[in-house]
Image: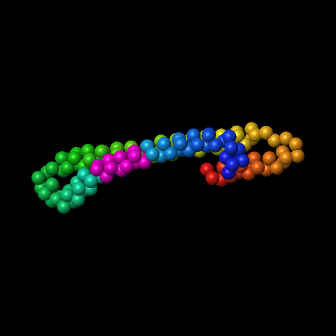
Amino acid sequence: MVFVLYPWFTPLLLLILAGFLLLDYFMNSGVVWTRRLDNATKSPVLHHLSSAAAGVAVIRGYGRETVVQRRFGADLDAHISAQALGRFSNRWFTFRMDLFALAFIGATAAFVVGGKGTGAASTAIAGKKGLSIRLILYVV
């Protein structure tokens, strides 16, 4: 691993890892909240569909189709809004995680390429640098 070959890389690695974990913690609590909201708004939609299907003769008999459609539209709008919130927050999270991964790859490449190596050992050091960059690209 890179931090074994370059011990001064460890503080940066710990900082990026802390950012990953912090973002993951907040995203998981947000996912729980949006799932609850999604389930709470899905229940009225499903209830409305099942009760309207069972009472379609009564609804048509009293001429209340527009009222039922209006209520269903309001319930469906709330559910779709909750679903959109979940999807948008998921996109936000994955974009931020990609930024952390990009920072990790960039920092690794900068530390590995910027490392000193001269003389007969420079070929071995170049091999270690290439291996370090390959490992970080493979892991992330």
Residue 117 is one of the magenta-drawn residues: no
Left-right relation of 73 to 22: left
Front-most of residues 49 and 63: 49
Where on the picture, by quarter, is residue 82?
Answer: top left
Left or right: where does residue 58 sit relative to residue 102? left
The magenta-colored residue range is 27-41
25 relative to 13 in the view: left or right: left
**Residue 33 image point, x, y percent:** 35, 46
**Residue 118 placed where, x, y %?**
85, 41
**What secondary structure characterizes most of the magenta part?**
helix
Q: Residue at x 71, y 44 (%)?
A: 6
Residue 45 percent location from the top left of the image: 27, 52
Name which residue lies at 84% across and 45% down.
122
Q: Residue furthest bottom?
A: 54
Whether 106 is drawn above or below 53: the answer is: above
In this picture the colour scheme is rainbow
Which residue: 13% across, 57% down?
58
- Reply yes or no: does residue 33 show up in magenta: yes
Q: Using the rendered image of the protein, determine whether residue 7 is visible from the camera's viewpoint.
A: yes
Of residues 70 and 22, which is closer to you in this image? 22
Residue for point 72% across, 47% down:
5
Q: Is residue 106 above or below residue 131?
A: above
In the rendered view, does 24 fall on the left or right side of 118? left
Q: Residue furthest left?
A: 62
Q: Between residues 95 and 55, which one lies in front from this camera angle?
A: 95
Q: In the rendered image, is residue 80 in sight?
A: no
Residue 52 figure quarter: bottom left
Q: Which x, y percent locates residue 37?
A: 32, 47
Numbered circles on residues, count:
0
